[in-house]
Amino acid sequence: MKMKTKLVLSSLFLLVFLGGCAEKDRLEDGSKLIDKDTFVFAASGEFKPFSYVENDMTLTGFDVEVGRAVAKELGLEPVAKRIKFKGIVEGVKTGRADAAVASHTINPQRSKHVAFSTPYYYSGPQIFVRPDSKIKTVDDLKGKEVAVAKGSTYASTAEKYTGNIKMYDSDITALKALSGGRHDAVITDFVTGKTAAKEGFKIEGRQLIERSEQAIVLPQDNPQLLKRVNEALENLRQDGTLSKISKEYFGQDITTKPE
């Protein structure tokens, strides 16, 4: 009986493994897609206004609209796939999505595992605190409890200034906890924090720590798709589409590289 159970479990594992490693459709130009007619891109749905879920359970937001615009430029049907932020890079690596349009910051650690497009917007981590906080700069974070999102680059940023870090599933839940009286600060994207403050969170932005570049994530073994995505982004930049989407969600253009 034990041998039979082991055989069944082994067979199930093999089916799951093979399913996760299914062969992609190869296009004439050499690029590979899950389906030759669609562009399946991952987004978290946890990161308003970049990516969030509407009442009808559809994904929307700045990232999602950029993903749809890229798909259209590629001549493909857009398919937005919701994956928790902390699992998106692995999801792209293992073929659950063709790409991720999910506000990933370009950094050396991620570049070991995935490829990055040219940046589609520019941002940077900022300190957010409650209005009565005395914290103003990174020098004030020593020993303080700082909350960040799991899987984000802000955890490594926070580690430079304090050893007391709390993790949340998303930036918004971290900011909500801060607004509600927990933790001393949150480090997150300045646009995300600014938007949360406008929506009534009891928080204020303090020091903008640094500038960063956000890009589309793609598998390393799909250079032709990377080339096509970069060409699509450049066309969308030149014809004003990226700027238009940005202004719709933020009231400003965050897609142009700062001087």
Image (tube, rainbow, N blue to C red):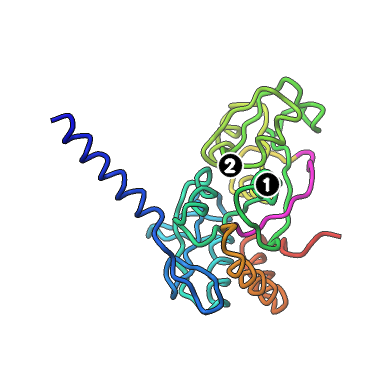
Q: Is residue 172 visible?
A: yes
Q: Is residue 216 magenta?
A: yes
Question: Magenta residues, as a range?
Answer: 206-218
- Disc ID at residue 245: none
Which residue lies at the image location 57% right of the left edge and 64% below the top edge?
Answer: 222
Q: Position of residue 255 (x, y in %)?
A: 72, 64
* Coordinates of residue 110 in the picture (x, y in percent): 64, 47
Most common SS among magenta residues = strand
Q: Few, some or many C-alpha atoms within 10 Å of disc 2 (few <14, some 14-19, many ≥20)? A: many
Q: Which residue is mark 1?
A: 189
The quarter in which the N terminus is drawn is top left
Is residue 252 something one can see in this rendering? no
- Between 65 and 15, the residue placed more toward the observer is 15
Question: In the image, residue 195 lies at what x, y percent?
Answer: 63, 50
Quadrant position of the C terminus in the picture: bottom right
Q: Toward the viewer: 243 or 106?
A: 106
Q: Is residue 212 above or below residue 178?
A: below
Q: Which numbered circle lies on residue 171? A: 2
**Residue at (59%, 66%) from the top-left corner?**
66
- Kind of residue at badge 1: Asp
Inter-mark Cα distance, 1 to 2:
8 Å
**Residue 100 sits in quarter:** bottom right
Q: Residue 172 is drawn in which quadrant? A: top right
